[in-house]
Image: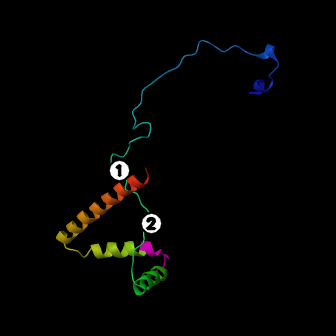
Amino acid sequence: MGGLLKHGNDDQVKSPDKKVNVNVSSISRKQAGFGEDSVEKIPTFDVNMRVDNHTRNAVLALSKATADKRSASEMVALMIESYLESLTPQTRDTYDELVSMMETKDKLDYKLKSK
């Protein structure tokens, strides 16, 4: 690399080796790190949800009262998980279908906004 800085010295310039062997092998897109997941990921982004001040205060108080000092979002997620355990199988199926539809809508909206 030091030879690159000596522009005027023509006697030190080496001719390139013309006998270069290159080994070529084909790899799949998966091996290269593309397309490992066939399932598209659903984007996560912040949104607002309107609740009254009492509900907000209750969620914030619960989040601060726990030993882990969770965020309000984490607290709501925990409460949802806890509530889902009490649902009947039929209600849980309906819930899963509705969430799937809403997640698909979010994915499509996100794709349209990112173009």
Where's residue 17, x and y in %? 64, 14
Decide whether residue 67 is among the magenta residues. yes
Viewed as shown, does residue 66 lie left or right of 91?
Answer: right
Nearest the eye: 44 or 24: 44
The part of the image, by quadrant, that contains residue 88 is bottom left
Q: Residue at x 73, y 15 (%)?
A: 14
Where's residue 94, x and y in %? 21, 67
> Of all residues shown, which one is farthest toward the bottom?
54
What amino acid does circle 2 point to? Answer: Asp
The part of the image, by quadrant, that contains residue 98 is bottom left
Quadrant for the N terminus in the image: top right
The part of the image, by quadrant, that contains residue 91 is bottom left
**In this view, 31 is above or below 99:** above
Q: Residue at x 70, y 13 (%)?
A: 15
Q: Residues within 10 Å of mark 2 (few under 14, many from 20)?
A: few
Nearest the eye: 47 or 32: 47
Where's residue 13, x and y in %? 75, 16
Looking at the image, is mark 2 or mark 1 nearer the viewer?
Answer: 2
| Segment tinted magenta in the rendering | 66-74
Residue placed under numbered mark 2 in the picture: 46
Q: Secondary structure at mark 2?
A: loop
Distance, label 2 to label 1, CA atoms, is: 19 Å
Q: How is the rendered protein coloured? A: rainbow
Dot placed on the residue nearer the N-terminal end, 2 or 1: 1
What amino acid does circle 1 point to? Answer: Glu
Q: Secondary structure at mark 1?
A: loop
Viewed as shown, does residue 72 lie left or right of 16?
Answer: left
Residue placed under numbered mark 1 in the picture: 40
